[in-house]
Image: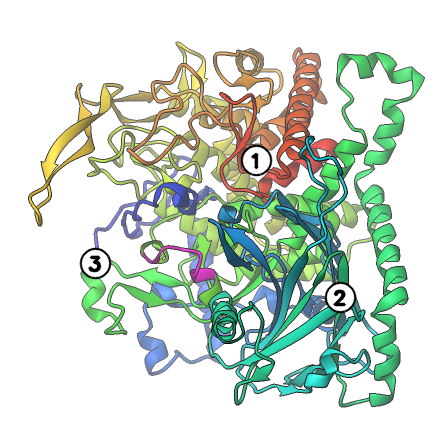
Amino acid sequence: MKARKRAASSFSSAADDKAPEKTAPKRPPKVQRGGIVRKVCPASTALISVISVLALGAFSLFWSGGLSPAGEEAMRPRAITPLPVPRVSDLKQFKGEHRERLFWGTYRPQNYLGIRARVPKSLLAGLMWLGVKDGRYSLRHTCEESDKLSRYGWLRHDGTTYGRQELLDQELSLTTSFLKSWEDGCGYGGDWVVRVKVEALKSTDTSEKDDQPKVQPSSVFFYIADEASRPLSFWPKGKNIADAPFVGGTASEIGGWHFHVHHKEDVAVSYAGLRNNHMHNLTELVTNALITQGQLVGRLQLPDNAEKHSNIAVLQISGVFPFEVDLVFLSGVDKKRSEVKSRLDNLTGPKLDERLAQKEKEFETRFEDTFKLGERKKERTSPANLTLVKSGYWVEGEKEIEVGRAALSNMIGGIGYFYGQSRIAIPAELRVQAPEPGNPDHWLYWPAELYTAVPSRSFFPRGFLWDEGFHQLLISRWDRSISLDIIAHWMDLMNIDGWIPREQILGAEARSKVPEDFIAQYTSNANPPALMLAIRGLALSLESDLKRGRAKEEDKDYLKTIFPRLQAWFNWFNTTQSGKQPGTYYWHGRDSKTVRELNPQTLTSGLDDYPRASHPSDDERHVDLWCWMAVAAETMALVARLTGEPYESYETTAEGLKNLKRLNEMHYDMESGHYYDYGLHSEEVKLRWKEVRDPNTGIPQRILRRVVLKKPELGWVKHFGYVSFFPFAMRIIPADSTIMGHHLELLTNHRLLWTEFGLRSLATTSSVFMKHNTEHDAPYWRGPVWMNMNYLILSALQGYSQEEGHYKSTAGILYSHLRENLIRNVVDRYYESGYLWENYDLKSRGKGQGSHPFTGWTSLILLIMAEMY
């Protein structure tokens, strides 16, 4: 393995370290974002490094009881060895009431409706229904863009006890309501119910004489399955008797359980009991059961029988819509059987109507108390503000508020629980030591659980490291305890070197959504430390509470416990992502040998195809990583100070990285007034067709190959875009600096980033603006509008507008106009398409594009509405 010498920071000295260099495989066209590698934390000093080593040594003794691990544990490669410090998720605040409150949930975001508990081997429940795809009946189950639903997503979700979503599929409308309940006699985690309401959509065809819904039959399916393969007990008569259970079993923690189906007599219910040890292929299992029975009876109906030792129960509810069914899960039924009847009554029929209505009201009240958009609506319509209304600065109305509710609900409702082992790519020179003969190219991380939000239920239903930092900016405003729990789970995934796998593909269900070649993670690859933004918010909150004398001990304990992990993470960035020049950084892992890419991607930066130096080398300097390191160092200093740890070296590092003179020496082009990357670069690079012959068949083929028409030279990488605005977005530029004034001018230049839909990612003046990077890779961060970067720049504008100086007023005006543009476009596109989108196009007048629904960082539109930064 090639050793990389870490350059000593100009703000601190440092020891040499080894950083493996391995280029991650290119993602297929649409999986491009899986290269989501994001930015990271700054470097500290030799003192920090020494402290870290001593701290890790001490914790290692604590962890092992004073002895080194023996046997296989001692031989475990460092890459798959956990950091030997106490786990953050083991803190007392995440046990007891907190754990039970979050035990059950809609934690399978890749399904249209998927329920599980936050344990490795859980009972799973979920919804399916019959739809039509390519002229054939098809079971809807996992969220698929190819299903082409008009709309689906949570309209209300509180993250703990209640959620309501709508799914619009051709002429069918399904509404699912999820409710948890704790009553006398229930088991651990409580009871829960799902109400499924099936209706017909009104026709949108104006030629129809009658716009009333068509009356036609439909089938929905609901299943409950045991991941631990424990056999279920069936009581077939229970499918038609309201008070009788249909299926039951036992499970650890919750004890005995029963599952009831409550419906009116105008529906038909059939069932099947299936036996299978794997749960990622449930759609296929149910489809095969329907086909087999259909060949016998001539209709798509389950067979009304169960295989021996079945661990999966599937119900089919068929009827002429509209109809509805209540599906009730009761836990602890082996304790107080006398209470079962009243618990069932409270979760079905009219009583359930009342409880759902009450939960809806509670959500809306809490939403308003938290984000206060209703107050803004009142202010907007007051006579005193009519001038502002006309100028367009006030944009919150009922339409906007409803989009805000959906943004929050989909973010919260998209939180998932995953369990499994990440695959870690083995460096080529070590593959002879692979522990598994059948898998010579990867090691397995330790078994781990992850509680996390996801960017997109349809295309990215798993955890992404830098995305999660932005997710927590919203989630922490809604439910701080959930946010702290999620951050704790991510921090617990850190290995002994301080590295966290950037993409979490845990378990068979998660792997089923990812091409096999792109599952392994590379320990040399970083990802932006955006979680530092959320941790900084927590630390600032604690600092404020300490001054007021109302700080909670659990917040202090949290920061004390997480600090060693933050320290290791920070040091990993500082020693593996440093540049040649002291105190500089660049994203390691770019492919210097590619002949297929116009500009080699920087997946680790999170900005994928954003143009960098045309010829990757260790001479590079990346301005965005410099800024991430500044934020990280500042956060480390704050957390260290609050927890009584040495903070001076972090403070020195932060001051150095925020030194404008030093930043300008490394990244500022005096001629243009732009911040740029630096590296070995040529603008004369093209993609050209070349005819080659297939070595196996001899058949000629045409492929696009990269051609360099002018020798690269060391210098500025003159592509203006999001990267150029990082010093502004992270507020490193002083408010009274002339550079600040110039950046406000740059911001409004329509040839650069300004559009009426938000700030584009790359200026039209760039030679690669909206250009494909390969034959199949469409422009990704080369023009479209992305919400996370717009949010950071808006946050900076608001901050600058509140600082005294020449540019205060201008910053405020630009803030208002940019905010209005973003809100108006996202809201308009939501009502037009039914979704929030991954990014927004320019050629199509701000139309949403990419994966959808994308309710990861696009949900930050709610914080923009509420002006929470």
Q: CA distance from mark 1 to mark 2?
A: 40 Å
Foreground residue, 512 or 798?
512
Foreground residue, 306 or 638?
306
Q: Which residue is mark 2?
A: 325
Label 3: which secondary element: helix
Q: Quadrant of residue 824?
A: top right
Q: Position of residue 44 (x, y in %)?
A: 45, 45
Label 2: which secondary element: strand
Q: Amino acid at mark 2?
A: Val
Q: Which residue is mark 1?
A: 788
Going by the image, does 661 lie left or right of 150? left
Q: CA distance from mark 2 to mark 3?
A: 55 Å
Label 1: which secondary element: helix
Q: CA distance from mark 1 to mark 3?
A: 36 Å
Q: Amino acid at mark 3?
A: Ala
**Which residue corresponds to the image point at 58% horizontal and 71% vertical from the top-left?**
301
Tag in front: 1 or 3: 1
Q: Which residues are magenta?
A: 510-516
Contact? badges 1 and 2 (CB < 8 Å): no
Q: Is residue 626 visible?
A: yes
Contact? badges 1 and 3 (CB < 8 Å): no
Whether 777 is among the magenta residues is: no
Going by the image, does 425 lie left or right of 351? left
Tag in front: 1 or 2: 2
Q: Which residue is mark 3?
A: 428
